[in-house]
Amino acid sequence: MADDRARVVIVGGGVAGASIAYHLAELGWSDVVLVERSELTSGSTFHSAGLVGQLRSSVSLTKMMMYGVELYRRLGPETGIDPSWHEVGSLRLASSRERIEELQRLAGWGQTFDLPLRIVSTEEALELWPLFDPEGVEGAAYLPTDGYLDPTNLTIALAEGAKLRDARVWTDTRVTGIEVEGGRVARVRFAERDPVETDVVVNAAGMYANQVGALVGVEVPVVPFAHQYLLTKPIEGVRAEMPTIRDPDRLVYFRPEAGGGLVAGGYERNPAPWNWEQGPPSDFNHRLLDEDWERFEPLADGASSLVPAMQQAEIVRMINGPEAFTPDGEFILGESTVRGFFVATGFCAHGIAGAGGVGRVMAEWIVQGEPELDVWKMDIRRFGPHYRARGYALARAVEIYATYYDIHYPNEERQAGRPLKTGPTYERLQALGAAFGEKAGWERPNWFEQNTDERFEHLRPRGWAGQHWSTAIAAEHVATRERAALFDESSFAKIDVWGVDACAFLQRICANDVDRRAGTIVYTQLLNARGGIECDVTVTRLGTDRFRIITGTAFGTHDLVWITKQLGPADDVQIRDVTGSLACFGLWGPSARTILEQVTSGDVSDAAFPYMTAQQIVAGDVPCLAARVTYVGELGWELYPRVELARSLWDELTAAGEGYGLMPAGYRAIDSLRLEKGYRAWGSDITPEDTPLEAGLGFAVDMRKDFVGRDALERLQEAGLSRRLRCLVLAEARAMCLGNEPVFANGLVVSRVTSGGIGHTLGVSIAFAYLPPELSDAGTSLAVEVFGDRVDASVADDPLYDPTGERVRG
Ligand SMILES: Cc1cc2nc3c(=O)[nH]c(=O)nc-3n(C[C@H](O)[C@H](O)[C@H](O)COP(=O)(O)OP(=O)(O)OC[C@H]3O[C@@H](n4cnc5c(N)ncnc54)[C@H](O)[C@@H]3O)c2cc1C
């Protein structure tokens, strides 16, 4: 192998870089180079506590962790280097009723993908871990396949496994430059050796990843934090094979040490960011930070109150090491805006547990173009450009760290760094009592306090789901169905595509036929080669060579990168994100046309302005694009004025709607309305793991033309569908599903809920789930576990509301 060329250069010889090298080599890539500026493991990896816990916030991440355990079991025999894997299990204690409810919910969720998590009594937990004080402990979750290992040996074993398959490992080799040609990675420069030509670079530089990203102008919003744990001398009763244990209410975790001592650490409420603005110093390798006993004090108190033996235990040493955290507590993975420049970092003190899965997902991404799991929550594309502001990234990351062990109730809104992005009507919405939520930095009304209506109190979801809820949601829902409502959706991402080849390009990447008359709106998915749904959008043809794509607020960067990546070198196509220059108001409900007629002289009758078409109109004094589409299942329009004209339009519409009962409404009402109408949500109901055929979106696929993913759909059609997204109606109207609840048939788990909520018009609790053919027929009896209670449910044909679409056509 030539030393001046590599198929891929991985920057960073920590556990992540080593695992990516291992998995690339396993997938058959022979010319893999792993470079480390110092020795292997000399970043965060060497000082890790080595706990491997699999239970995480999303199914995909938990599956990645489960794969890690499989790998750690076999790595020793395979490579000859023992990572000291101790499969001792783990206990997560609950010291309050709410915590037990949280654990029950997680246990139910875990059943849907064979995570062997179960709830045990305090007595059982004590049998497994006799040293904790049971006072106030209500029970625990026990996961027998968790464990701990030696992080340094794990890294060396992974690197060895890669070398056995011909990967090269260059230590004491610092990357100093990465050259990009034609928007794609071309060459890597080093301090100690000649440059290497390559098409792929993986930034696995841990807390230094933002500095490595800067070499190609890619912002990687990691924030280093100091993280501490202490090691004790042997304590009587501690055995190396005791489970690891966490007590989130006391903010602490423990694991046994081989010699009979304990490792005790945790997440303090006053986190300590470290060199967050400029990044760690360039010589920070194999080093620790000074012990910070004052900051550790609350953790020490929590540890001694849970494990009284800690009060007398002798401390061997305190480890205070920095680690890369992220603004939302999720990993940062995937290909950046620079083609061929991948990122894998931000493991938020879970990089050892995550390393196996991270290596596999990244290798698939690099070799196959996309990973097999839906990793959107970890995808670098979830961060918009506003994360370039380090202060913002810091504020968000501090909040995540400080509340790490808190119970997070459904629909809870984060507070740090707000408000950041406000639309032109922000003050108007505030004056109306908007209860704002935040998405991708945007302030968006969830509901309006002024719409609170006690008559809907009987609809409040029971249990946790009723916490962040308001009767205003139901009132706004009903107003949309019965009269009209006005929604500010200015945060919608808007992407313009134009150029001589724009139509042909979009025909190639969209599953539906977008080559229609100017003014036509087409609902379509953009698929990967496996037929999985990468983007779920509407495409409006504005002119012969000009199109506008509308997608969800949070998906703008993701979709933009996906679409741009599909461009071929010969395509004469321009793509631009125009989100910030246009506002968007949704005016929907049976009175929508009458209200619009008050402000425009244009003909908005059904004949002149049919469903799924768009026209330029003037509303009041405001020219805007009006698009007759809906995500709520009622007659109406999305109106797109330029931002500087948006407030005038809002005022015009509000005034025009006065006599017709027009109500300002928020996003939570939209969710309830769309569920009744069976509209799918990307990221939950439909993901890169699901095809449109399985998702019931075959009507939006045109198999007569060629497009990315078509072959996969054809194969699926031939083979027959093994699962379909179906609508369930629960027997109890206030048992609200939030997503991920297990679905049972004859007492066995058969699926999990993708999304759910209460349909206020129909007065039922609705959930979606992928089901096998034998359970898909309407009327099939199933059950859904909602916060520990099995609630009967039956399969129903969707949409439940207005199945013939009469109301949409108005
Ligand atoms: C105190 C503490 C306890 C922890 N406990 C646990 C635990 O119990 N369980 C768990 O799962 N996780 C734990 N973690 C987290 C875990 O250690 C990390 O997530 C993981 O080690 C990160 O690995 P990495 O490969 O991403 O980064 P690192 O190990 O930091 O590796 C990055 C490497 O990149 C190299 N590099 C940087 N710039 C360049 C360049 N320009 N050229 C070449 N090389 C470069 C660095 O030298 C470094 O070696 C803990 C972390 C800390 C701090």
Image: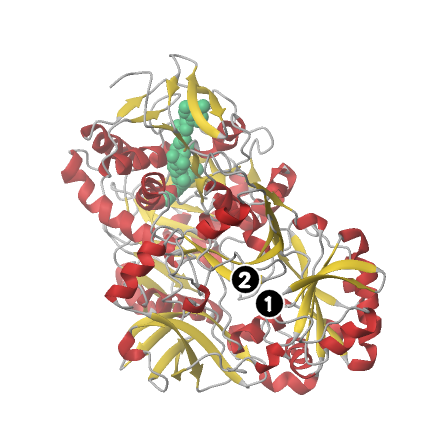
Q: Position of residue 283 (x, y in %)?
A: 47, 20
Q: Residue at x 62, y 58 (%)?
A: 518
Does 83 sit left or right of 786 as displayed? Answer: left
Query: Is 715 above or below relative to 151?
Result: below
Q: Residue at x 47, y 58 (%)?
A: 525
Please name the amino acid that badge 2 sits on: Val
Asked if the residues shown at circle 1 and circle 2 are in contact, with their CB atoms under 8 angstroms apart, the answer is yes
Q: Closest to the observer: 68 or 321?
A: 68
Coloring applied to the structure: secondary structure
Quadrant containing the N terminus is: top left
Q: Position of residue 558 (x, y in %)?
A: 51, 48
Give the alpha-carbon distance from disc 1 to disc 2, as whole Å.
7 Å
Label number found at residue 612: 1
Q: Residue at x 51, y 70 (%)?
A: 679
Which residue in the protein does label 2 denote?
Answer: 522
Ligand 1's image quarter is top left
Q: Closest to the observer: 127 or 19?
A: 19
Residue 64 at least partly seen: yes
Q: Find numbered disc 2 in the image and state the secondary structure of the residue it sits on.
A: strand
